[in-house]
Image (spheres, helix red, strand yellow):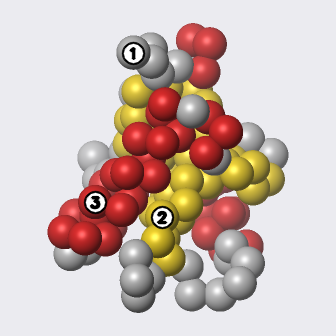
């Protein structure tokens, strides 16, 4: 059993944007995302490096493509911190999503990894 686990970034107000996005999806889409996240948990090679310390878990249904942007955090990288989740509508991951993920990661670290 892997010692790693997923956590969701929380804003200073307590919102968890990645989790809240997933919660808005239909059951098939949400299941695809959770399956992709589980694959990363079990085998880190299921993730793709995006930029800097940001990686992505890739999920797909028949009609949609989703991404969860995350970073390895905590002692020994045992925490996979989901900082952003979105539906991918273009060939490349939007730079605005990557910038947002990096900003959320910096905010999480600045606030002391709560």
Q: Does 5 sit above or below residue 81?
A: above
How far is mark 1 from mark 3, CA to CA? 21 Å
SS for dot 3 = helix
Location of residue 92 in the rendering, given as x and y in whole percent from the top left corner: 73, 78
Marks 2 and 1, how far apart in space?
23 Å
- The mark that comes first in sequence, 1 or 3, is 1
Q: Is residue 37 visible?
A: yes
In the displayed structure image, the side of residue 39 where residue 96 appears, left or right: right
User: Disc 1 marks which residue?
Assistant: 1
Residue designated by label 2: 59
Q: Residues within 10 Å of mark 1 (few under 14, many from 20)?
A: few
Circle 3 crowding by C-alpha within 10 Å: few under 14, some 14–19, many from 20: some
Q: Position of residue 7 (x, y in %)?
A: 38, 35
Badge 2: how crowded within 10 Å, few (<14), some, or many (20+)? many
Give residue 65's position: percent from left, percent from top.
50, 77
Q: Quadrant of the C terminus?
A: top left
Please state the horizontal and vertical placement of residue 98, each as a whole percent of the image.
Answer: 68, 63
Residue at coordinates 52% horizontally, 19% vertically from top-left? 78
Q: Residue at x 34, y 52 (%)?
A: 34
State the mark number for residue 109. Answer: none
In what quadrant of the picture does the N terminus appear?
A: top left
Q: Residue at 73% across / 41% down in the picture? A: 53
**61 on left or right of 42:** left
- Judge by depth and name the residue closer to the eye, 1 or 79: 1
Q: Position of 8 compared to 79: left or right?
A: left
> Disc 2 to disc 3, how far (Cα)?
9 Å
Per the image, label 1 sits on a secondary structure element best described as loop
Residue ID at (49%, 31%): 42
Residue carrying label 3: 31
């Amino acid at each position: 059993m892997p010692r790693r686990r997923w956590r969701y970034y929380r804003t200073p107000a307590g919102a968890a944007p990645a989790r809240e996005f997933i919660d808005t999806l239909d059951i098939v889409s949400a299941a695809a995302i959770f399956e992709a996240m589980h694959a990363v948990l079990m085998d880190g090679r299921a993730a793709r490096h995006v930029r800097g310390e940001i990686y992505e878990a890739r999920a797909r249904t028949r009609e949609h493509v989703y991404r969860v942007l995350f970073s390895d955090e905590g002692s020994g990288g045992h925490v996979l911190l989901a900082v952003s989740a979105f539906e991918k509508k273009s060939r490349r991951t939007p730079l605005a999503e990557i910038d947002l993920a990096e900003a959320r990661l910096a905010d999480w670290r600045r606030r002391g990894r709560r």
